[in-house]
Amino acid sequence: MALYLIDNPVMRAELKHQQHVMTTSRSGRVWIALAMLLLIPAFLSSALFLFGALTAIDISGFVGNIGGYNLVIHLIIMNVALYAVVTLITMGLASNSIGREQTGHTWESLLLTTMDARQIIWGKWWATVRSLWGDHIMVGLLRIGLVAWTAIEWTRAINPADRPNLIFLLLTIGIVTLYTLVDAGFSAVLGLLTPLSGFGNSIFMLVLGARIGITIGILLLVNWIGSILPASDWQYILAALIGLMILALVTVGALRFAEIVAVWGHATPTKVSQPVS
C-alpha cells in the first residue's frame, strides 16, 4: 500500500519535471560548481576525521600541519551552510510542485485521473525527496565527519591514549544517517503545506520558522531525555532514537495534515452516486 502511494503517476510526472528543471537550469549548474569548490575541503576533512575515528590512528599531527582547527571550523560552517541551502531548495521544490498546479489550474486534470488526496500529496512529496537525494546525502556525509571529530575529541578529553568506542561510533553514524533521511522528508512536507494553506508565499517564512523551531525543540528534547535516563553508556543513544522516532511521527502527521488540507482545496474528487438502471 505504501509503495502504491509514493510510486504513482503523479510522482513519476513530478519527478520527471523536477529533474528536467534542475538539469536545464543554468543557475543550478553554477551553484553546483561553486558549492563543490567550497565543499571539497569539508568532504576531505570529514573523510580524514572518520578515518582517524575508525582506525584509532593519531591524525592530530597531520591535521595540525594542514591548518589544525581551521579544518574543524570549515567543516562546521559547511555543515550549517549546506544544510540551510538544501533545506530551502527542498521546501521550494515541494512548494512549487503544488503551486504550479494551482496557478496553471491543473488540479482538475489530477481529478480526472481519479487520484485521491493521499496519492497526490505522497506522490508530490516523494518526487521532491527523490529529486534531492544527492544533496541530502552530501549533508549526511558532512554530519558523519563532524560526529567522527566529536568522538575523537571526546575520547581524547577522557583518556588521550584511548580510541573512540567503535560500536557507539557506528551506532551514532547510523542514527545521524537515518535522521538526515527523515529530516529530508520533513522539509519536503512543510514545503507542500505552504501553497496548500491558501496564503501563498507570504506564509513561507512562517513555515520555515516553524521548521527551525521544531528541529531545535526535538534536539533539546533529546538532550533532556538523555539527562533524565539512568546513567549508562547507552542513555544518549536511546534518547537519540526516541528523538528520531518523534521526528518520523511528526513527518507522517504533517503528511496526513497535508492530505486533509488538500481535500479542503478540492484535491479529492467528489464521490457521485451512479443511477441504478
Image (cartoon, grey):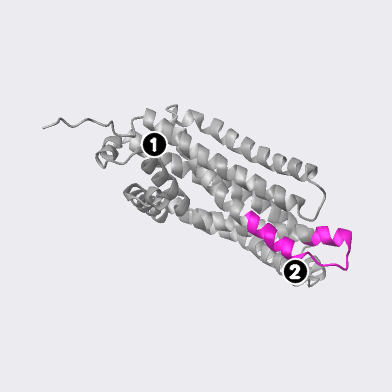
Please rate how many residues cluster around mark 1, counting C-alpha atoms within 10 Å: few if below 14, some from 14 to 19, many from 20. Answer: some
* Residue at the spot of label 2: 52
* Residue at the spot of label 1: 99
Where in the figure is residue 237, as x and y percent of width and height?
A: 72, 53
Q: Amino acid at mark 2?
A: Gly
Is residue 158 shown in magenta?
yes
The magenta segment is: 152-176
Where in the figure is residue 192, as x and y percent of width and height?
A: 45, 38
Where in the figure is residue 121, as x and y percent of width and height?
A: 40, 41
Q: Nearer the viewer, residue 29 or 207?
A: 207
Q: State whether residue 63 is above or below residue 111.
A: below
Is residue 113 shown in magenta?
no
Identify the element where label 1 is drawn. helix
Where in the figure is residue 214, as x and y percent of width and height?
A: 62, 37
Q: CA distance from mark 1 to mark 2?
A: 47 Å
Residue 262, by quadrant, is: top left
